[in-house]
């Protein structure tokens, strides 16, 4: 059912793993701390993300694309793997549910004000389940098409907004202390660390040795695109106004106009965004199911996709109902959990591998 | 001829990647194709609004009356063919191109919703072009309106904002000639004005919000007014060539914080445009022989102009170094002059410079008197001198600092071309 | 022509019993054989049985059987009956059946196709192909002489896929004519034609044509396997084959192309596709076909590359318009009115004043009306054709608008959608989006642009998961293979495409020499000079 994906496709997957919700959630959080220096904190978090990608890439390299939890199970004990799997499953379920919630919130705020959340959640979930059933290869293919569309939408955006931009809004640079920049870059770092989904995509990589490169390339593109969206929003609105706006990137799109004829085109950009978040959600659903598969060592995940989807839908509908809860989690709780699962877990796996190898070598030397 | 053996071989998986159990693929694709159908059946249409259920507002006006919000909406009447320059969609020409609703409420949204008590259509704000704020309301404070515009999903933050002395709602009743959609007409007016004349900047709502939330905390808004006393609100009344009362741009209102604190005259507004680098194109009337007479007898079209402002800390106060550079074409000359002579050109240039300088100084005096930083000096200072700005911000002494600011305008204007004739007509006539 | 009878369907349900009856050998007695044959055929008036008996000796008794209408009567008379009847040896008494058989087979039939047969079934199947059977008394073998010559349509211009520049001949219903047209275009020993007989009752000849070395072996093996797997009683048109062998059971998208044009098939073969020509229909199949193949017209290569690139882009545009325009119109006018320019919005609103139906119903009504008109146009006798267009255009279009039933904008939208649909060169894919359009309109009316995007996502992922004989349906765009993109959205000049621009290929991927760009005399001189300076002998070679 699942074919293999090559490195370029993996890099593109990384882009859409991070970007869609990042463009929606991050600008407000970052600019609250860093104002016009927001681009700097993006750069800072990119560096952090590159390190995470390196760790994850190394973990994939040493396991050579074996299913992560199975590999951990072989290296330590099956119990450890199962316990770790359960935690990670919980983590991915949560993350996927928050993505769904962010998706639905955005749609509710911007497009469909009166449509019930439940309907949206069910529709999105059904579509995403279909996507996941088509396999990661199909997802990767569609993903590459959607990414290519940036080549159309980004210039369109830029062209329509160029008259409204004022470079001076970016001044003064370096106005904020390193402390506040770091503070501002914490949240984006958690987003960048989502590159860790590669850990579970590893079995589907054509070339697991190059996972690190895929992660890096993907992250760099994410950084460029994030900078693009942030800088344009900043140049149009200035730092103060951005804090005010819930979705600055899309408010900027609302200002886009071509002559006096085409105005208020934000819906066009939202439509494109919808495509990309579908992909993000499907990637995470896929990873969640992969995690489930590896934890419970089931050979086929098909019967469970629906069930897990239902869990995610329920969690999204009832657990993340409050926006303030979600915001709080995004701002504070998220970093901890993401650091734990996206950085420490693969790091620990590498350490485990190293120690075992060293021990094996020593034993070899002794004998 | 080959006799093919007819082996019974079910159509099944291949070694090629097509391999997928066809039954499940079928089931899923079937399910998915039915999905949109299902969703239509089960659900309704929540956000669906037909075009003929919408009251498309082209402009809105807000007044503050008896401690209540009074909102006026101009709703386009589509069947009158109000699609711009005399649409051809048919319909009776006697019906007005738009109708207005005036409602009162404790909050703005309450007022808007009250419209539904009298209107057959749901108000739809996305196509609003202008919003006019009454003077009373502007003095009361406009934060709530800005917030509403930014928060409400269908409100455009790109509407142009105007002030009106007296009642703002009355402006929206006025019919325009040549343009049936009055809101769009006023937008055209201000856009054209700032493109060709540059007295007033066209201020859009997000720009207003940006200006008010910036370091300066002040903004300007152009005034829209009626030239006469009578409101032309009957379609039969506008069927004359010279309307007794038209819409026009008047003064420039100055807002500080969220309140209107004063007005700048047209001349002062022009000066301010020079300081804030808002000049796109402008016509300047100036005396061609400043020594012999002060009456302007020549005009000059300023085609390019750029202003750079540099703050300098001078012991205890700021000095703003304002450099205005411009170039353009001479378009009118009433005196005796030979334009081949370099000296006469530079004489005129000096005269224009002097004129601009006066404008700027005049404007600055008034702005300083009002104490509202509509010049954007605070932003400049923040950008160039961060440390001192932090001090100012902490001590909240910007108002005092602003009052102490001294400006040093330097103007350099260049007459690049003199048009199609080399000599003034007057000089030819005398010979 | 065989018709679907209930009997026939029953047979297909129970293939094992009826499909492979035990072969019945020819009886040595001519009478018995004839009896057996007439039992099989029944008393059909077009079966002509002529006995030929040597009266002096009863040992040599012959019979000719042929079907009137399938054979060329002149050929039968002149090359089969006449020589046999007039030949002296046959009239002699001494001749035995064995000798006569050998004599006739080796010397007396001035015909290319002579076959021997031992079973009744074999002889009958030859009979139905227009052979004349020669049965011998006392032998369990029989001869069949190819005398086929039935009435067939002459080669005409293809009606469904016309071109301005390019060959004007199309396939006819005859399989042989079809293969001959390909032979004429591809004079290479690599052209292979494998013939199948599919359908127990129709016995339709199906020819698998490909170019050895250019077509991918894996694809060929797969197509052969699928063709062998077809068990049905009838193949009347290429669509029968298509439905039996195409990938992805229930997809609305075609994964096999069909064409009436021999040049299109030849072009496909040269790019590694495999052609399937079916007797009895002028429509041949080409597989594997990706999504983008359906937007390539053979005329693309007969016109200059710049205009064909432009036309191809227009086709993609038309595809999206045809699929999305009504849905977008509904979504924009009922959900996202803010994105319309104000003046347009007002005139749309003015048109909708007084229209009783909601936009969705209006659109569905008009789209259905158009589909009815279109179907009527196809079914109508030619002479009444113009009436349809008058009724359709005037009555339904103009009158509906002036009666206030639908808005003028909707009529524009529907007609533009309809016209766009005809721009797509392949009717197969144009038809598939005709249905998708309705689904899109429904979801657009429910969820607006978000719904449209969601549906597009489903479509995209569906397409991305689709294969045509092992070739990803969206290749070479997804998965992206940049070097094959030269003939997808644009068509680069032919000299710039040295490799075959398809993803499924055999070994021979190169199709023309390097440096095929036309060079002016100056260029050549310069080149000669350059190479002359560097290497003398090579420069001479080039000159």
Image (spheres, coloured by chain):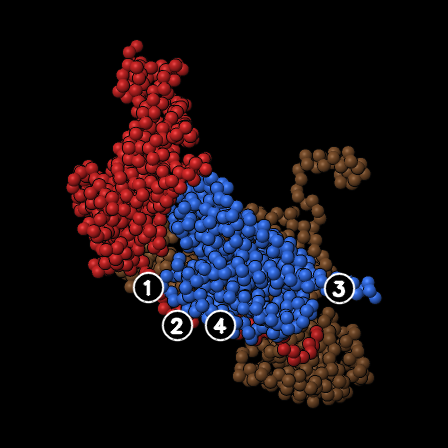
Note whether A198 is above or below B84 in the view shown: below
Name the element at disc 3.
Answer: helix
Labelled disc at residue A281: none
Residue located farthest toward the left when viewing the structure as drawn: B230
Q: Position of residue C370 (x, y in %)?
A: 40, 63
Discs 2/1, front = 2
In the figure, what tint was chain A given?
blue
Q: Which chain is red?
A: B
Would you name the residue on which mark 4 appears? Answer: A310
Residue C158 seen by the camera: no
Labelled disc at residue A359: 3
Residue A71 seen by the camera: yes
Query: What is the CA distance from the residue labelled 2 to the residue labelled 3?
Result: 63 Å
Q: Are marks 1 and 3 on the same chain?
A: no
Tell me: B291 left or right of A180.
left
Would you name the residue on which mark 2 appears? Answer: B42
């Amino acid at each position: 059912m699942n074919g293999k994906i090559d490195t370029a496709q993996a890099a593109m997957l990384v882009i859409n793993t991070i970007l869609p919700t990042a463009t929606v959630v991050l600008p407000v959080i970052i600019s609250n701390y860093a104002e016009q220096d927001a681009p700097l904190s993006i750069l800072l978090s990119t560096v952090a993300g590159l390190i995470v990608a390196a760790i994850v890439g190394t973990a994939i390299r040493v396991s050579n694309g074996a299913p992560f939890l199975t590999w951990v199970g072989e290296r330590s004990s099956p119990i450890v793997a199962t316990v770790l799997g359960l935690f990670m499953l919980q983590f991915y379920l949560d993350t996927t549910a928050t993505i769904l919630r962010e998706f639905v919130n955005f749609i509710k705020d911007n497009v469909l004000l009166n449509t019930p959340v439940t309907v949206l959640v069910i529709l999105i979930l059904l579509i995403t389940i279909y996507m996941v059933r088509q396999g990661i290869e199909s997802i990767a293919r569609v993903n590459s098409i959607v990414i290519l569309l940036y080549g159309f939408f980004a210039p369109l955006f830029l062209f329509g907004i160029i008259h409204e931009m004022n470079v001076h809004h970016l001044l003064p640079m370096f106005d904020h202390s390193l402390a506040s920049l770091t503070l501002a870059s914490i949240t984006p770092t958690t987003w960048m660390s989502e590159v860790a989904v590669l850990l579970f995509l590893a079995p589907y990589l054509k070339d697991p040795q190059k996972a690190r490169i895929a992660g890096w390339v993907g992250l760099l593109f994410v950084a460029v695109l994030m900078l693009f969206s942030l800088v344009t929003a900043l140049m149009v609105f200035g730092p103060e106004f951005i804090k005010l706006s819930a979705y600055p990137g899309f408010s900027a799109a609302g200002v886009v106009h071509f002559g006096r004829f085409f105005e208020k085109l934000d819906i066009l950009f939202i439509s494109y965004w919808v495509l990309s978040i579908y992909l993000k959600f499907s990637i995470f659903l896929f990873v969640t199911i992969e995690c489930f598969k590896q934890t419970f060592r089931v050979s086929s995940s098909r019967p469970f996709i629906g069930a897990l989807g239902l869990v995610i839908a329920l969690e999204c509908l009832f657990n993340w109902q409050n926006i303030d809860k979600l915001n709080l989690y995004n701002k504070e709780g998220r970093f901890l959990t993401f650091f734990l699962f996206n950085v420490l877990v693969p790091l620990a796996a590498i350490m485990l591998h190293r120690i075992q190898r060293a021990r094996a070598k020593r034993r070899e030397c002794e004998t | 001829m080959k006799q093919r053996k007819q082996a019974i071989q079910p159509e099944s998986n291949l070694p090629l990647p097509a391999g997928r159990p066809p039954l499940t693929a079928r089931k899923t694709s079937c399910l998915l194709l039915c999905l949109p159908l299902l969703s239509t059946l089960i659900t309704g249409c929540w956000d669906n609004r037909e075009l003929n259920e919408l009251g498309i507002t082209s402009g809105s006006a807000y007044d503050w009356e008896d401690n209540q919000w009074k909102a006026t909406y101009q709703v386009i009447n589509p069947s009158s063919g109000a699609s711009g320059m005399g649409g051809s969609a048919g319909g009776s020409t006697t019906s007005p191109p738009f109708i207005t609703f005036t409602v009162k409420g404790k909050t703005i949204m309450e007022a808007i919703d009250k419209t539904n008590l009298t209107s057959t259509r749901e108000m739809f704000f996305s196509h609003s072009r202008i919003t006019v704020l009454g003077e009373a309301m502007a003095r009361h404070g406009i934060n709530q309106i800005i917030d509403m515009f930014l928060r409400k999903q269908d409100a455009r933050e790109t509407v142009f904002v105007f002030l009106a002395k007296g009642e703002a709602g009355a402006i929206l009743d006025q019919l325009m000639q040549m343009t049936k959609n009055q809101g769009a007409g006023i937008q055209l007016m201000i856009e054209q004005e700032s493109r060709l004349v540059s007295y007033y900047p066209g201020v859009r709502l997000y720009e207003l919000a940006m200006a008010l939330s910036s370091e300066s905390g002040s903004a300007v808004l152009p005034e829209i007014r009626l030239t006469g006393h009578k409101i032309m609100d009957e379609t039969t009344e506008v069927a004359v060539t010279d309307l007794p009362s038209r819409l026009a741009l008047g003064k420039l209102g100055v807002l500080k914080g969220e309140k209107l604190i004063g007005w700048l005259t047209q001349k002062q507004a022009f000066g301010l445009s020079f300081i804030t680098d808002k000049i796109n194109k402008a016509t300047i009337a100036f005396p061609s022989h400043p020594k012999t007479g002060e009456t302007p007898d020549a005009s000059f079209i300023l085609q390019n102009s750029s202003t750079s402002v540099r703050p300098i800390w001078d012991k205890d106060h700021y000095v703003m170094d304002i450099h205005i550079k411009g170039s353009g074409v001479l378009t009118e000359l009433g005196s005796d002059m030979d334009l081949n002579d370099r000296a006469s050109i530079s004489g005129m240039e000096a005269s224009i410079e002097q004129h601009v300088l006066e404008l700027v100084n005049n404007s600055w005096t008034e702005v300083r008197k009002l104490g509202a930083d509509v010049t954007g000096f605070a932003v400049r200072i923040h950008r160039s001198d961060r440390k001192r700005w932090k001090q100012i911000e902490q001590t909240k002494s910007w108002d005092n600092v602003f009052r102490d600011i001294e400006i040093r305008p330097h103007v350099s204007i260049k007459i690049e071309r003199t048009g199609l004739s080399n000599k003034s007509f007057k000089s030819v006539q005398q010979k | 022509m065989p018709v679907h009878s209930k009997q026939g369907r029953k047979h297909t349900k129970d293939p094992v019993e009826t499909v492979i009856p035990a072969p019945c050998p020819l009886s040595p007695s001519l009478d018995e054989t004839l009896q057996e044959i007439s039992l099989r055929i029944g008393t059909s008036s077009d079966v002509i049985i002529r006995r030929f008996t040597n009266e002096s000796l009863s040992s040599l008794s012959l019979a000719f059987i042929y079907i009137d209408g399938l054979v060329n009567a002149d050929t039968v008379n002149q090359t089969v009956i006449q020589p046999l009847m007039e030949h002296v040896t046959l009239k002699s008494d001494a001749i035995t059946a064995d000798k006569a058989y050998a004599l006739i087979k080796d010397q007396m039939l001035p015909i290319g196709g002579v076959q021997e047969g031992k079973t009744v079934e074999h002889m009958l199947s030859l009979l139905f192909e227009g052979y004349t059977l020669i049965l011998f008394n006392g032998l369990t073998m029989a001869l069949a002489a190819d005398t086929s010559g039935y009435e067939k349509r002459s080669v005409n211009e293809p009606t469904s896929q016309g071109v301005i520049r390019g060959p004007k001949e199309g396939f006819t219903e005859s399989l042989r004519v079809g293969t001959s047209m390909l032979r004429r275009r591809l004079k290479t020993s690599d052209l292979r034609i494998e013939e199948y007989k599919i359908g127990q009752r129709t016995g339709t000849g199906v020819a698998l044509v490909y170019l050895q070395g250019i077509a991918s072996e894996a694809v060929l093996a797969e197509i052969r396997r699928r063709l062998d797997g077809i068990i049905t009683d009838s193949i009347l048109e290429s669509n029968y084959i298509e439905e039996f062998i195409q990938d992805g059971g229930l997809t609305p998208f075609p994964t096999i192309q069909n064409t009436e044009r021999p040049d299109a098939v030849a072009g496909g073969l040269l790019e590694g596709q495999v052609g399937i020509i079916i007797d009895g229909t002028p429509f041949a199949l080409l597989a594997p076909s990706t999504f983008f193949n359906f937007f390539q017209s053979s005329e693309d290569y007969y016109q200059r590359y710049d205009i064909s690139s432009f036309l191809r882009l227009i086709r993609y545009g038309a595809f999206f318009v045809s699929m999305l325009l009504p849905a977008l119109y509904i979504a924009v006018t009922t959900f996202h009115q803010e994105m319309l320019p104000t003046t347009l919005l007002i005139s749309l609103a003015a048109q909708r004043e007084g229209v009783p139906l909601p936009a969705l119903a209006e659109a569905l009504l008009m789209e259905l009306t158009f589909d009815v008109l279109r179907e009527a146009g196809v079914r109508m006798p030619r002479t009444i054709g113009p009436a349809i267009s008058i009724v359709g255009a005037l009555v339904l279009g103009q009158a509906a608008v002036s009666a206030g039933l639908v808005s003028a904008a909707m009529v524009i939208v529907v007609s533009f959608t309809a016209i766009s649909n005809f721009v797509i060169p392949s009717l197969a894919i144009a038809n598939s989006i005709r249905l998708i359009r309705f689904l899109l309109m429904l979801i657009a009316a429910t969820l607006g642009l978000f719904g449209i995007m969601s549906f597009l996502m489903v479509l995209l992922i569906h397409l991305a998961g689709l294969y045509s004989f092992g070739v990803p349906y969206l290749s070479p765009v997804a998965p992206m293979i940049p070097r094959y993109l030269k003939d997808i959205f644009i068509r680069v000049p032919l000299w710039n495409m040295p490799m075959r621009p398809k993803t499924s290929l055999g070994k021979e991927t190169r199709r023309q020499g390097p440096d095929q760009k036309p060079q002016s005399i100056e260029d050549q001189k310069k080149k000669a000079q350059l190479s002359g300076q560097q290497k003398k002998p090579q420069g001479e070679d080039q000159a």
